Amino acid sequence: MKLTISKNELNDAIQQVAKAASARPAIPILGGIKIDVNHQFVTLTASDTDISIQSFITVEQEDLVIATIEKPGSVVLPSKFFAEIVKKLPSDQVVIEVGANFQTTIRSGSTEIQMVGLDPEEFPVLPSIEQNEVLQVPGDLIKAMIRQTILAASTSEQTPILTGVLWNLHDGELKFVATDRHRLASRTTKVDAESSFNFSNVVIAARTLNELSRLIPDQNTVVDIVVADNQVLFKVDNILFYTRILDGTYPDTSKIIPQVFETELVLDTKNLTDAIDRAYLMSREEKTNIVRLTTMDDGMIEISSSSTELGRVTEQLEASSMTGQPLRIAFNSKYMLDVLKVLDSEKLFIGFTGAMRPIIIRPMDHDYSMYVILPYRTTS
Amino acid sequence: MKLTISKNELNDAIQQVAKAASARPAIPILGGIKIDVNHQFVTLTASDTDISIQSFITVEQEDLVIATIEKPGSVVLPSKFFAEIVKKLPSDQVVIEVGANFQTTIRSGSTEIQMVGLDPEEFPVLPSIEQNEVLQVPGDLIKAMIRQTILAASTSEQTPILTGVLWNLHDGELKFVATDRHRLASRTTKVDAESSFNFSNVVIAARTLNELSRLIPDQNTVVDIVVADNQVLFKVDNILFYTRILDGTYPDTSKIIPQVFETELVLDTKNLTDAIDRAYLMSREEKTNIVRLTTMDDGMIEISSSSTELGRVTEQLEASSMTGQPLRIAFNSKYMLDVLKVLDSEKLFIGFTGAMRPIIIRPMDHDYSMYVILPYRTTS
């Protein structure tokens, strides 16, 4: 294998795939980036077996020669060092040449690097996904849906299925749900799909969705999604992103969501966020993050928190609307802040069905998203 | 004590002093910020006994009322929470009122905070420094001198004196020296001081100088420096910064610096930095950071490093000038990079007196700074 390639194109592709290489590989090959060179494409692949990312560099792009291929071939190079050194090479052009025993020479300007390459035959084989039905979703929409749900995914490996986000497609509606049993986030969207095209119980690790999000440009991208038996494939521009579907059955969360409320509030999102943020600072000192919300007689609500050592924060805030029973409830302020930070609506609805029942938070501007927080049982 | 004060002015002063409050105070009072209020000034003080910072807010500034004092007094409030909450208060104005047992109420907009205050009588007393001779140095110069020397200070508490930077004033020349026994940095400057005004063996912790640096604005400031028996006082605008002088006698470093060289090189600073940076990436994999420099016959030098697992980086670079004996030397590339990053000269001089003698690095544009790195003894 021998080629000359533009440093910037090579560097971009490395940055795209490198996230999938294991930081602490069980065997060295899993910490590598595989380079496959033919006369059309230079393909980079990294895989920690849970996720695999592949980036294609087209050798000639609109009369522009990105790479000159002298001899096709393959090699696997250690990801971390390869990524760092390419970024710092002195010239715009990089020559990569693979010799006997995959010994690789990289030249750029007056820099020469000898690298111990590995046998590409030992590299994990990517899942073969038949070109099933393809779901096409705008990139910025997928990113928003990920951001608005992963906050509620569990970070504990004790229940692995809850570390994922559940994806369902039914009747042209794509729905994401995440819960860690203390809170729940749900986000739906209409998509352009035949009503016969359905899937359910597709659960993808929140961590993986975070990585996927980084690969999607903010604007003007369509993501192609193919769901296979135990894998999902995402195609973003020149990148293929494969991820495993988490094993197990995602719990049915529909029953925990109350439909009627004893107390209903409409509040200004920014004012509530700021007030809870200040109360959170005090609650954090107690490690519990407990904040109290109390409705008052005059259409006001009070947000408060206290710490035995430090003191007490009390916030008053006017409700845009308040109906139903008076209320005094305690909840985890960090959970509430997580929701408020991703709630894309100027005003929000909060529904309560009593001090020990789930709290529902919904944007007022649309009905695409819904959040649930379980309250705390407190003595006072 | 009761006053109304501008949130921004209060916040600025808190940020200035908070660095001196202990993050993990042995007794709670050392984790606090003392507020002293009289009709001229609101004074904030924090002290971990090693360093103390005091910031003065003038109550009326050019017809602008910054604070309205209803009742003078003092209180100590917990630094971390106080700093965080003030930043997030909803209104531009903050009312602070101290009641019985130093119970403190902070009000801003519809936010009310009760804080457990502490008795200011228990707060550490600041060192009293007689107004000795005052050395005046431009702020940006002090910052540059700190930045160009602290890199060589030791981070090991085994020899506490070497964790500091040595300051000497002699005959109108101010000199900073730092060394961790493996490398040395020295920086001098002419200052406006009577030749009779001298000091020596003033050693200030590098960590402290770092904090001092942050307090000095980048432009148009003069720093007043007063050296007392075991304390140094810095005055920067409205801030007083006190620091302890480290105990002990700083070693005499003048003898380790060679004056004549067997090999002399002049190199382009940026080219050398980039080449060593790439070699460093490889050397880091071996944990040793060892990089080799070899002079070649054709006026070129070679920089190289190798790792048994990864491979080898070789860099060639043209010397602007090369005189004396051929040379092959090994050194810590991280130490060299630290020097190159602060060297404010387009070209630099490197002097060698043999493979096991100190390496001298000097800027070509001026003679204010000088660096020494001890080479590594290597087998090959």
Image (tube, coloured by chain):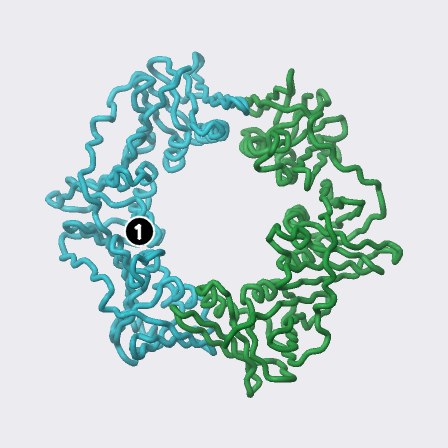
Chain colours: A cyan, B green
Q: Residue at x 65, y 75 (%)?
A: B351
- Residue A327 drawn at (x, y percent): 37, 15
Q: Can residue A278 be seen in this view?
A: no
Image spot of residue A284 (x, y percent): 47, 30
Residue B164: x and y, percent?
A: 68, 52
Q: Is residue B223 shown above or below B172?
A: above
Tell which residue pokes out farthest to the left in this image.
A196
Residue A196 vertical position relative to residue B42 in the rendered view, above or below: below
The reply to whether residue B272 is in sight is yes
- Element under label 1? helix
> How many marks overall?
1
**Residue that appears at 23% across and 61% down:** A124
The residue type indicated by label 1 comes to Leu
List x then y, in percent, for residue A208.
Answer: 30, 49
Location of the N terminus of chain B by quadrant is: top right
Tell whether A175 sits left or right of A292: left
Q: Which residue matches tag 1?
A: A212
Q: In which quarter of the image is residue A377?
A: top left
Instruction: Read off the chain for label 1.
Output: A
